[in-house]
Amino acid sequence: MNTPKKPIRLFKRYKNVSGKSTVSKYEIEKDAMNIIFKNGSAYRYTNQSSEPGNISKMKDLAHAGKGLGTFITDTVKDRFCRKIR
């Protein structure tokens, strides 16, 4: 009997250009992002929970390796879809 496989997670290490970020890793999907913070907590942010413009900005900041943690703290705040861990 075949059991369904869990999707493969493709988290990337956050560059953390400033060296002060609370973000450790991120995963980008079409309409969402998963973020793992340095304290071990992980959250899923979606277009529906955080607004498409915010998700787009988060993707840009993640690629740049700078400003993602601050943007989440100051702008997105607790508008995550769910806590992963």
Image: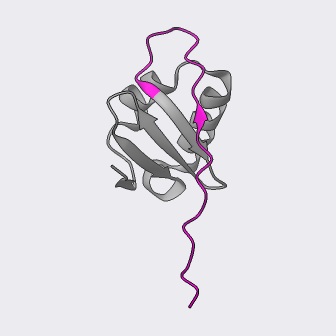
The quadrant holding residue 49 is: bottom left
Measuring 63% from the left and 47% from the top, which residue is drawn there?
10
Q: Residue furthest front?
A: 1
Observer-nearest residue: 25 or 49?
25
Looking at the rendered image, the quarter that the N terminus falls into is bottom right
Q: Which residues are magenta?
A: 1-23
73 over 34 or under it: above or below: above
Q: How is the image coloured?
A: one colour
The quadrant holding residue 56 is: top right
Where residue 70 appears, x then y in whole percent?
43, 22
Measuring 67% from the left and 29% from the top, which residue is drawn there?
63
Residue 51 relative to residue 22: left or right: right
Is residue 69 part of the magenta span, yes or no? no
Observer-nearest residue: 41 or 50?
41
Where residue 4 appears, x then y in whole percent?
56, 79
Measuring 38% from the left and 49% from the top, which residue is drawn there?
80
22 over 30 or under it: above or below: above
19 over 24 or under it: above or below: above
Observer-nearest residue: 51 or 12?
12
Where residue 79 appears, x then y in whole percent?
37, 47
Is residue 12 part of the magenta span, yes or no? yes
Observer-nearest residue: 1 or 29?
1
Where residue 84 appears, x then y in whole percent?
37, 52
